[in-house]
Image (cartoon, rainbow, N blue to C red):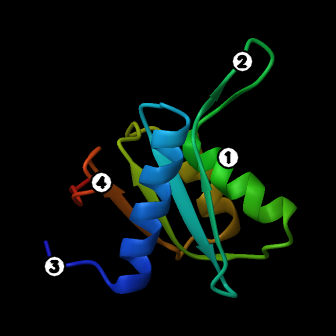
């Protein structure tokens, strides 16, 4: 796989940082149409369950983002519900999936 563009590598770093801070098994980050970035880790409460990508997408949308250029999902499941949320808002957004180390993987 080709090396990531600098902006996409930044998303990987942000996603891994969110994963580490939350001591979670996955992390995610998105870049909106203005170049702003948002990161998230999974939330697992009795009353609220969100994947890392759902958190990142929701954070961006609640901050005024109207679309997305790209998203990174680090160590997330193939059926991550955040992928559906991202596709609903930005069906052509680039989606990069990586392993826990941040190395891109084919999905």
Q: Of callouts 2 and 1, which one flags the residue occurring earlier in the amino acid sequence?
A: 2
SS state under label 1 = helix
SS state under label 4 = strand
Q: Where is residue 84 in the image (x, y as percent from the top left)?
A: 59, 50
Quarter of the figure with residue 52: top right
Question: How many residues crowd mark 1 within 10 Å: few (<14), some (14–19), many (20+)?
Answer: many
- Residue at 74% x, 64% y: name it: 60
Q: In which quarter of the image is the N terminus?
A: bottom left
Q: Of callouts 4 and 3, which one flags the residue occurring earlier in the amino acid sequence?
A: 3
Quarter of the figure with residue 2: bottom left
User: Spatial distance from mark 1 to mark 4, Cα to Cα?
Assistant: 18 Å
Q: Of callouts 2 and 4, which one flags the residue occurring earlier in the amino acid sequence?
A: 2
Residue highlighted by disc 2: 45
Residue 41 showing in the rendered view: yes
- Residue at 24% x, 60% y: name it: 104
Residue highlighted by disc 4: 98
- Residue at 41% x, 63% y: name it: 13
SS state under label 3 = loop
Q: In this view, does 49 lie above or below 88?
A: above
Q: Do the residues labelled 4 and 3 touch (CB within 8 Å)?
A: no
Q: Position of residue 97 (x, y in %)?
A: 34, 56
User: Spatial distance from mark 1 to mark 3, Cα to Cα?
Assistant: 28 Å
Question: How many residues crowd mark 2 within 10 Å: few (<14), some (14–19), many (20+)?
Answer: few
Q: In this view, does 18 lie above or below 45?
A: below
Residue highlighted by disc 3: 2
User: Spatial distance from mark 2 to mark 4, Cα to Cα?
Assistant: 25 Å
Quarter of the figure with residue 106: bottom left
Q: In this view, does 34 lie above or below 52?
A: below
Question: How many residues crowd mark 4 within 10 Å: few (<14), some (14–19), many (20+)?
Answer: many
């Amino acid at each position: 796989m080709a090396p990531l563009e600098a902006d996409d590598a930044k998303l990987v770093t942000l996603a891994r940082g969110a994963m580490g801070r939350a001591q979670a098994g996955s992390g995610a980050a998105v870049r909106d149409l203005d170049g702003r970035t948002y990161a998230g880790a999974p939330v697992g409460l009795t009353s609220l369950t969100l994947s890392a990508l759902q958190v990142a997408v929701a954070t961006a949308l609640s901050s005024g983002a109207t679309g997305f250029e790209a998203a990174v999902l680090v160590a997330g499941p193939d059926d991550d519900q955040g992928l559906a949320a991202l596709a609903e808002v930005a069906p052509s957004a680039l989606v990069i999936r990586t392993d826990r180390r941040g190395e891109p993987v084919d999905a």
